[in-house]
Amino acid sequence: MSIRLKKRFGQHLLISPGVLEKIAEFAELKEDHIVVEIGPGTGLLTRVILKYPIKKLFLLELDPEMINYLKNNLKDERIVLIHADATVFNYNEVSERELKVVGNLPYNVASLIVENMVFHHSLIPFSLFLVQKEVAEKWLSGKSWLSLFIQTFYDLEYLMTVPPRFFKPKPKVDSALIRFRRNIKHKISSLSKYKEFLTLLYQHKRKMLRKKFSEEILQSVSISGAKRAEDLTLKEVFLLYESWLQTSLS
């Protein structure tokens, strides 16, 4: 059965056996692990993951044709196929136990998938994603709202670059394998409020802080209004957030 890859799903299949093996190795898969693979496609990475003695493997796939292909071609009692959109998927539906999440993410929605994962960080201590190299570098930079959102809850590690020749069809850019290990830097009571704050902070990021926050808020945390978002340390971001939160709730 031949599969037609669809541009709207951002499908680029990773076809290098060596890279697939390396990804599974970096995933540190153990006997009791419950794993979620996002965008399994034709199951090339899935087959490598199944070589490990994991407990359960949930496959999240949006393309109905891929779902049918996997049903017909992958036979393993540990597999649970789920037709779902990983940008909005509720991970609590599959397990109350902690999950490992892996995947070769579609370029066009990778940031939305990772944002959704962060919203479920209490359930996901570890994830491993193949994404566009430029996007991975932006997450590591700490210079965007999503980068800070991620780094509040996870330590990031750039593992390797994967060139276009290892994919079908070949993308126009390099990809990067990036690992997330949960390490909560600050207790956040409301993730939606925290996201609201970070998007405000990084909206028109070249604007000085005094254009975004009141003098009262800035003085309360001893941060100069002449600073810009990218000048702040993570500690200063948390201080500013707590002061902003108190003001917004009062």
Image (cartoon, rainbow, N blue to C red):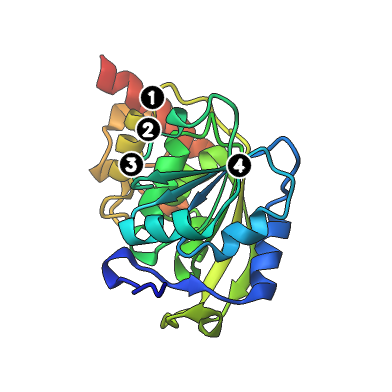
First in residue order: circle 1 vs circle 3: 3
The residue that label 4 is drawn on is: 78
Report the mark closest to the observer, 4 or 3.
4
Image quadrant in which the N terminus is located: bottom left
How far is the residue under mark 1 from the one under mark 3? 18 Å
How far is the residue under mark 1 from the one under mark 4? 35 Å
Secondary structure beneath dot 3 equals loop
Q: Where residue 228 sits: x, y (%)? A: 37, 51
The residue that label 2 is drawn on is: 194
Of 118 and 103, the residue lying toward us: 103
Judge whether 162 appears above or below 32 on screen: below
Of 43 and 176, the residue lying toward us: 43
How far is the residue under mark 2 from the one under mark 3? 18 Å
Q: Which amino acid lies under the numbered mark 1 shown in the image of this protein? A: Ser
First in residue order: circle 2 vs circle 3: 3
How far is the residue under mark 2 from the one under mark 4? 37 Å
